[in-house]
Amino acid sequence: MRLRRRRRVRAKVRGTAERPRISVFRSNRGIFAQLIDDDAGHTLAQVNWLESELRKLPPMDQARQAGRLLGERAKQAGIDSAVFDRGGYKYHGRVKALADGARESGLGF
């Protein structure tokens, strides 16, 4: 069912070089996010829950901090705006925390 929802979301959301797509994958153990330019098929920035500063945090704090890190890396890449692809997950809990963390760091969507 998640994959069906994911395809439905992806039919409407497209990333460009100026406004890339934030793709989210949530596993039971952690969270992953990427900034993707769909036109070129390139990942511009990414964050992974296995990074040392995220690994020891509780899940909600981990997601918020991952969003902040992704926002900082986007700023370094010269990106200030993006579109959010929730990947078929509800915009709730860790997915919402990641989005809020990215907004806190100045990434607009």
Image: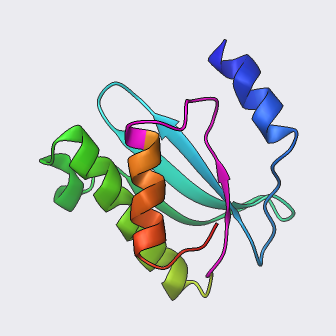
Residue 14: where, in percent of width, then height? 83, 54
Please state, as top left, top right, bottom left or bottom right, where the N terminus lies in the image: top right
Q: Which residues are magenta?
A: 80-94
Q: Would you say the magenta stretch is mainly helix, strand or loop?
A: loop
Residue 34: quarter of image: bottom right
Residue 58 left/right relative to 32: left
Which residue is at 61% across, 81% downward? 80
Residue 5 versus residue 86 in the image, above or below? above
Which residue is at 33% across, 56% downward? 64
Residue 2: where, in percent of width, then height? 63, 19
* Residue 78 shown in magenta: no
* Residue 88 shown in magenta: yes
Residue 90: where, in percent of width, then height? 55, 30
Residue 73: where, in percent of width, then height? 46, 76
Which residue is at 63% across, 36% downward? 87
Please state, as top left, top right, bottom left or bottom right, where the C terminus lies in the image: bottom right
- Number of numbered discs: 0
Residue 65 left/right relative to 90: left
Which residue is at 54% across, 38% downward? 91
Residue found at the far left of this picture = 56
Residue 48 versus residue 26 in the image, above or below? below
Q: Is residue 50 visible?
A: no
Tell which of 3 and 96 is nearer to you. Answer: 96
